[in-house]
Image (cartoon, rainbow, N blue to C red):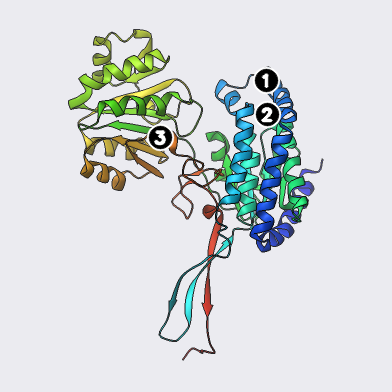
């Protein structure tokens, strides 16, 4: 395959389709979303069979457990894909929304109109659900999309893409509104991220190495996050009954996600009370604790088995483990907790457990992350949980899209002016 020519062709088709997608009615877009959802449900067994073949090859290739977890589809996750598309169909269409209209002394009225970004390139690894999620969000927000999934999910991605393509056509929209790159050659990624004449923004979803490469080499704007070192801080005034399930859910519900807690901070005044309970729960789940000397002494005295305790290194404070490992540190209080998080955090998601309103508000204001929470699990940092429908990714950049990126994050604004014959003097 001539990769440059192939990618240029995809780009041209996407650019042409983007004009039609931007002009599509809400009714047509919603019809497409519901049709795609129905086709995904109807072809559940086909999707599971394709996924099984992808998984078999991935195990042969020695794919890491966290990646295998992301790659795996189940009947439940397929239903979630379909439900996510249907939820997107129920959301208000952001395209064409006019806001902030103000009359100026000259007589003109000035405001904003929300418009699609254009063509969005999405690059992802071992997550077949992204094919449906990204297609749905790009479709509803009036964008065209070029999707490049990882080779690990090639067969499953192609099966989902067929549902998307047919759904677009049946709704009277261009089938090229969502295109899936059919080659696993990595050169295709290099072409996709250097086609500003065809692609308006790149959204990478994958490992740190992939995102670093794209951020370094792209000639197209990138919406990204490099890693997810999320924290839970147990404050001096934490409710112990809330703290345990929050830490348990934040860390152990799933290990391979970017909103999983990787660091636990505990106020010194509560450490002797809270750490033994947390340690027993984490050890019971098979989680290794890499702690500061003070926290390890408390955990050891509480008879937490030694195989679950390890001295933390400097690197542990900023690590995204994606595994049953958590860094543990005792801090003097809120000031040190905020300073630690802002220094080591990846600015993804951080949570405080406290009953003190003033401290909670300080944490919300001063922690410089895309999602900041009070008395809630970090696992809620997700587009579906935030009511955005399926998310296209998480952004830790300080641009128009930050945190879970849903419909609004895939649009921009342009200035609009209403006049009645006014001229500038």
Indicate which label's residue lies in the foreground, 1 or 2: 2
Quarter of the picture holding the N terminus: top right
**Residue 408 coordinates in the image, percent (x, y):** 52, 55
**320 on left or right of 87:** left
Residue bearing mark 3: 378
Rounded to the nearest whole Å, what is the CA distance between mark 3 and mark 1? 32 Å
Q: Which residue lies furthest to the left in this view?
A: 269
Q: Is residue 138 above or below residue 417?
A: above
The 10 Å Cα crowd at callout 3, few under 14, some 14 to 19, many 20 or more, is: many
At mark 1, the secondary structure is loop
**363 on left or right of 41:** left
At mark 2, the secondary structure is helix
Q: Which residue is drawn at 65% across and 34% down?
A: 128
Of the image marks 3 and 1, the number of the one nearer the N terminus: 1
Quadrant of the image occupied by residue 25: bottom right
Rounded to the nearest whole Å, what is the CA distance between mark 2 and mark 3? 28 Å
Q: Which residue is drawn at 34% across and 36% down?
A: 351
Of the image marks 1 and 2, the number of the one nearer the N terminus: 1
Q: Which residue lies furthest to the bottom in this view?
A: 425
The answer to whether the residue labelled 1 contacts the one labelled 2, judged by CB atoms less than 8 Å apart, is yes
Residue 236 appears anywhere in the view:
yes
Residue bearing mark 1: 61
Residue 125 appears anywhere in the view:
no
**Residue 338 coordinates in the image, percent (x, y):** 28, 39
Q: In this view, does 276 lie above or below 314?
A: above
Quadrant of the image occupied by residue 141: bottom right
Quadrant of the image occupied by residue 39: top right
Of the image marks 2 and 3, the number of the one nearer the N terminus: 2
Residue bearing mark 2: 152
The 10 Å Cα crowd at callout 2, few under 14, some 14 to 19, many 20 or more, is: many
Indicate which label's residue lies in the foreground, 3 or 1: 3
Q: Is residue 343 above or below residue 289?
A: below
């Amino acid at each position: 395959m001539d990769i440059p020519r192939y990618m240029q062709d995809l780009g041209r088709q996407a650019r042409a389709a983007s004009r039609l997608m931007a002009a599509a009615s809400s009714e047509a877009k919603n019809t497409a979303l519901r049709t795609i959802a129905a086709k995904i449900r109807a072809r559940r067994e086909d999707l599971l069979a394709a996924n099984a073949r992808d998984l078999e090859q991935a195990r042969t290739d020695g794919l890491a457990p966290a990646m295998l977890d992301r790659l795996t589809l189940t009947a439940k996750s397929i239903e979630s894909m379909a439900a996510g598309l249907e939820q997107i169909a129920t959301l208000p269409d952001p395209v064409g929304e006019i806001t902030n209209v103000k009359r100026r002394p000259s007589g003109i009225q000035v405001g904003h109109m929300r418009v699609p970004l254009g063509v969005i390139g999405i690059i992802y690894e071992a997550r077949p659900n992204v094919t449906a999620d990204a297609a749905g969000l790009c479709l509803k927000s009036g964008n065209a999309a070029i999707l490049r999934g990882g080779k690990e999910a090639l067969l499953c991605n192609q099966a989902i893409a067929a549902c998307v393509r047919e759904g677009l056509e049946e709704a009277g929209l261009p089938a090229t509104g969502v295109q899936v790159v059919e080659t696993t050659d990595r050169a295709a990624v290099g072409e996709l991220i250097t086609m500003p004449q065809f692609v308006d923004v790149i959204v990478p979803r994958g490992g740190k190495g992939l995102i670093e490469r794209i951020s370094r080499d792209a000639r197209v704007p990138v919406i990204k996050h490099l890693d997810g070192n999320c924290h839970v801080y147990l404050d001096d005034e934490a409710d112990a009954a809330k703290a345990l399930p929050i830490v348990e859910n934040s860390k152990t519900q799933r290990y391979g996600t970017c909103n999983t807690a990787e660091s636990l901070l505990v106020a010194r005044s509560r450490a002797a009370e809270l750490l033994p309970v947390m340690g027993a729960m984490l050890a019971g789940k098979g989680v290794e604790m890499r702690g500061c000397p003070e926290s390890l002494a408390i955990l050891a005295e509480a008879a937490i088995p030694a195989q679950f305790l390890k001295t933390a290194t400097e690197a542990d404070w900023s690590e995204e483990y994606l595994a049953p490992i958590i860094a543990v540190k005792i801090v003097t209080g809120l000031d040190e907790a905020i300073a630690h998080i802002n220094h080591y955090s990846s600015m993804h998601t951080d949570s405080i457990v406290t009953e003190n309103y003033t401290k909670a508000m300080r944490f919300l204001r001063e922690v410089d992350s895309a999602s900041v929470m009070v008395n809630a699990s970090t696992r809620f940092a997700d587009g579906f949980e935030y009511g955005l429908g399926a998310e296209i990714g998480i952004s830790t950049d300080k641009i128009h899209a930050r945190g879970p990126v849903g419909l609004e994050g895939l649009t921009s604004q342009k200035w609009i002016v209403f006049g009645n014959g006014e001229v500038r003097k």
